[in-house]
Image (spheres, grey):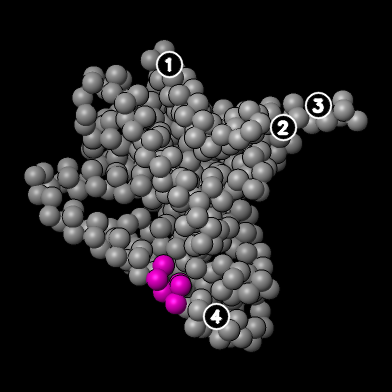
Amino acid sequence: MEIIGYVFVIIAFARLLAEGFERLGYPGFLGEITAGMALSALLINMPRDQMELMAELGLFFLMISAGLEVTPEELHYAGRKTVPLYVVTYLTMLVLTLPFAGWRLSSDTIIVAAILSTASAPIVLRLKRFFGEDFIHVALSYAVISEVMSLFIVYVMVRVHENPGNYLPILESVLKDAFFIGIILYLNYIIGIRHKVMIIRFLRRLKSDEAVFGLFMVFSTSLAFVSEELGLHFSIGGFLAGLMMHSDLVGTKQYDRLTTIVSGVTYGIFAPIFFAWRGLNFETELSFVVVEFFVFVYVVRLVVSSVMVRHGDPLTSAVRGAGIASFGVLGLLVGEIGFVSGVLSEHMYAMASLTSVMGIFASATLGRAVNYYRERNSDRAL
């Protein structure tokens, strides 16, 4: 079977299960991940290199979509709450991981703690109906920070592994990454002040949505290329491109044109492939220790998140905590990078993978249960 046949099978089956999960009240991407797990035993001879490329494009478009959902100002405002939350969460996960790693602080514990502190931006967007629009920017800000940090941590550990004892290249890379992101945000600020009207007028002259999308893709792929050359993951460039194209800069009409076509391409084609690919590559081991690790980690993280984003209503606090503690499919990617690079052991990779997937299901189930309880109480009140 040619690559197009495998793509057809994966998208069709992934969307079928996604629709089933949506009807059950769960986010559709859970069905897409499940589809990948189910197909892993059947699609043995598929061209993995080509499918991996398409899955990476899926991550790229998902990060673009996440960037389009928030403005730099909202990210900055929400970051005041989420940076301390991330620091507390990471340190807590690091301490919880130590007993399962022989009480040794190593690349295993450092990377697994990063994976367990993640809340995926694409998943937060799909879970937002469980905790409301008023909290979405805080949750999305946490997701972005945790994703960037998890990718940063695993790449730093890979560089340390490749150049033991030589930390100067790592420091240079960190400074270059910080400088690049700072320049992008500064340019966004300057352009928004001086050239906003010019940009809106230029985009209005474009007669088709495809032209707007084409220009945006040139811009986003350019940032992705620069990101990867600097040692960042290329999807960070896609997120920054989406972050810059907010409605305040390009105008509401042009923003709607862009988001409509990006959403169709992302969730209609590439996102199902990405989520299914993560399911296809899902590796874990089922044992009492692994299950115990998941239960222990999830309960502690849910409690920590709920307390730090608490609301007057305990149920709202629980749902917000579940949104922050939703882990994420990106954790599987980070684990895979660490495992393939030799900085993450197979046992810890398996435990982190199961925790990531089960955490997504647990958070979605908790959100659904709370929503059902509230709806039932409202019906009784009527």
Q: Quadrant of the C terminus?
A: top right
Structural distance between the alpha carbons of marks 2 and 3: 10 Å
Q: Earlier in the sequence, mark 2 or mark 1?
A: 1
Give residue 377's mark: 3
Q: Earlier in the sequence, mark 3 or mark 1?
A: 1
The residue under label 2 is 371
Q: Is residue 125 above or below residue 315?
A: below
Total number of numbered discs in the rendering: 4
Q: Nearer the viewer, mark 4 or mark 1?
A: 4
Q: Per the image, is 186 magenta? A: yes
| Residue at 28% in and 23% down | 98
> In front: 77, or 343?
77
| Residue at 31% in and 49% down | 152
Q: Give the quarter of the image for residue 364.
A: top right
Give residue 318's mark: none
- Residue 340 in the image: x percent, y percent? 28, 40
Q: Amino acid at mark 1?
A: Glu
The residue under label 1 is 292
Magenta-tinted stretch: 185-190
Structural distance between the alpha carbons of marks 4 and 1: 54 Å
Q: Amino acid at mark 3?
A: Asn
| Residue at 66% in and 71% down | 252
The residue under label 4 is 196
- Residue 139 in the image: x percent, y percent? 54, 45
Q: Earlier in the sequence, mark 4 or mark 1?
A: 4
Q: Can you see residue 175? A: yes
